[in-house]
Image (cartoon, rainbow, N blue to C red):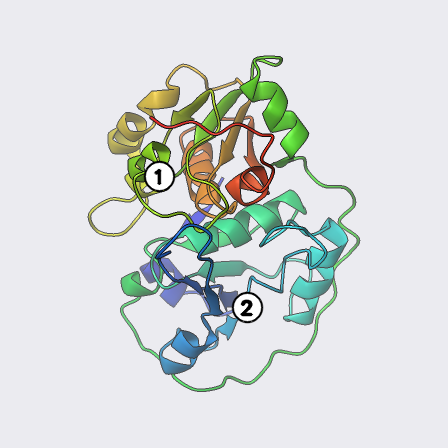
Amino acid sequence: MQALISAAELAATTDALVLDVTVQLAAPEFDGDYRSESGRGLWLDRHIPGSAHVDLRTVFADPAASYHFGKPSPAQVAAELAALGAVPGTPVVLYDAGSMQWASRAWWTLRDAGFDARILDGGLPAWQGPFASGEEPARSAGHLPDPGESRGLWADRAEVEAISLGKVPDELVCALGPEYLAGTVPTRYTRRGHIPGSLSLPAKSLIGPEGTVLSGEALSSALRPVEGRLDEPIVVYCGGGVSACLTALGLVLGGYSDVRVYDGSLDEWSADPSLPLVFS
């Protein structure tokens, strides 16, 4: 699977639909302090020439979900991707301002709907230029066939509850940093902590010093918390189902074959006071 594309390879590509999917999330100052902003302003200031900005708060997201960034239906993904100019065979490249998490979220969403895409490894900081600013001419709307059913890359709350209670043998993995597992910093969501029974595999631990995704022995070493579970079901969660997609990307690149993302993550879980959260 070619999930990543280098800046040099993208520079040599002339027919790709390049999408900046950056969203800005402010660091929470107190529990429940959730503030998001479109990354469109950043895109207008500086972007890859010919790219378009997509606001993941409203596009490739279910507006009826009870939590942020709810997963869309495959049919919605197809319609919105076509509206951006995609036709069958169009190479799709996703990038963000550098965290890699937003591009990973979009990649996971498209992948679940059956559409191939690649992530610019390292995001915009890896792009060596040229750069553009201001508006770009919109591509003509394309068309895509009905993608059919979801490819099963998402998990829901009931499934995560069953894993946490030990009713099914799937592995539950938290993609947040250790400070969030310990509950020592404010959370954007209702309550601090992590879901009982989950392992720690922070998304940021899969990014190397150059800002690109780890590979080879470095990736294998970072994935050691789930070592030996290549063919076992793994469900990844985080705060809002975004960083979890970066961890899921790392797992897929590492050869893990049965990975799903808990879409609602702690955004949904922490809102129900009957569901337990623990600290470590």
- For label 1, count other residues whose C-alpha is less than 10 Å away and answer few (under 14), some (14-19) or many (20+): many
Label at residue 75? none
**Front-most of 174 and 10?**
174
Amino acid residing under circle 1: Tyr
Task: Please tell me which residue is depicted at 42% across the width and 51% down the height of the picture.
Answer: 101
How far across and down, in percent of the image, does residue 54 sit?
Answer: 55, 68
Picture coordinates of residue 148 (x, y %)? 79, 45
Query: In x, y percent, where is residue 164?
Result: 54, 20
Asked whether the residues under the numbered discs 1 and 2 touch, taking CB atoms below 8 Å apart as contact, a structural biologist would say no
Side of 69 where 49 appears, left or right: left
Name the image quarter holding the C terminus: top left
**What secondary structure is found at the residue carrying circle 1?**
helix
Decide if residue 167 is in sight here.
yes
Q: In the figure, is residue 218 to the left or right of 193?
A: left
- Determine which residue is flagged by label 1: 180
Looking at the image, residue 178 sits to the left or right of residue 154; the answer is left
Q: Which residue is mark 2?
A: 54
Task: Using the image as rendered, state which of residue 34 and residue 162 is in the foreground.
Answer: 34
Q: Does any portion of residue 2 appear in the rendered image?
A: no
Q: Mark 1 and mark 2: span between their CA atoms?
A: 29 Å
Where 67 falls versus 137 (above or below)? above
Instruction: Decide which of tag 1 and tag 2 comes sooner along the chain.
Output: 2
